[in-house]
């Protein structure tokens, strides 16, 4: 169903969707997830939010990106392409977080549900 939603051009909290493909940190298996994206601050890049709905733990895909950053692909509607992954450092993360909650205010409540800092990742397609 996630792929169908992606093809139909649906959005999450008003944000465009991307299909993220990564390699499992423990399993080594290919994993896929559909995520909302935000402008990444660089040409062609996107930011994704590891909010996990404000739960106490990071989503599985965040661990996958950290463990296997060279095995990530993204599809923003033009087919899967390899992507460079960057975990945003505190200063840039805070700046981008403010942009995220401005564009999708629903994300703000996630920080009230958890004690963890919600990671932001920049994905830049390698074309």
Image: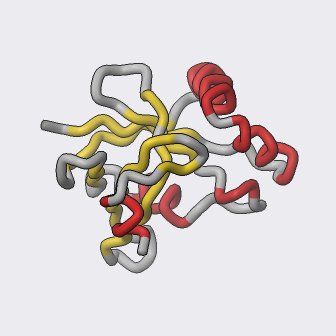
Name the residue at 33% across, 77% down.
Answer: 29
Name the residue: 65% across, 51% down.
51
- Quarter assignment of residue 34: bottom left
Q: What residue is rendered at 51% in x and 41% in y? A: 15
Q: Where is residue 58 in the image (x, y as percent from the top left)?
A: 64, 58
Q: Position of residue 76 (x, y in %)?
A: 30, 46
Which x, y percent locates residue 100?
61, 31
Q: Nearer the viewer, residue 7 or 90?
A: 7
The residue that appears at 37% across and 42% down in the rendered structure is: 85
Left or right: 35 with respect to 117?
left
Quadrant housing the C terminus? top left
Q: Residue 97: percent from the left, percent from the top?
A: 64, 29
User: Which quarter of the figure has residue 27?
Assistant: bottom left
In this rendering, is residue 67 above or below 50?
below
Q: Quadrant for residue 21, please give it.
A: bottom left
Relative placement, left or right, of 12 versus 21 is right
């Amino acid at each position: 169903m996630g792929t169908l939603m992606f093809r139909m051009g649906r959005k999450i909290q008003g944000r465009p969707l991307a299909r993220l493909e990564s390699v499992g940190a423990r399993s080594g298996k290919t994993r896929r997830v559909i995520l909302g994206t935000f402008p990444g601050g660089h040409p062609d890049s996107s930011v994704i939010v590891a909010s996990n709905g404000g739960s106490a733990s990071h989503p599985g895909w965040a661990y996958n990106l950290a463990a296997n950053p060279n095995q990530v692909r993204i599809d923003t509607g033009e087919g899967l392409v390899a992507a460079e992954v960057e975990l945003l450092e505190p200063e840039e993360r805070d700046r981008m977080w403010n942009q995220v909650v401005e564009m999708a205010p629903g994300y703000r409540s996630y920080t009230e549900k958890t004690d963890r800092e919600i990671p932001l990742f920049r994905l830049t397609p390698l074309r």
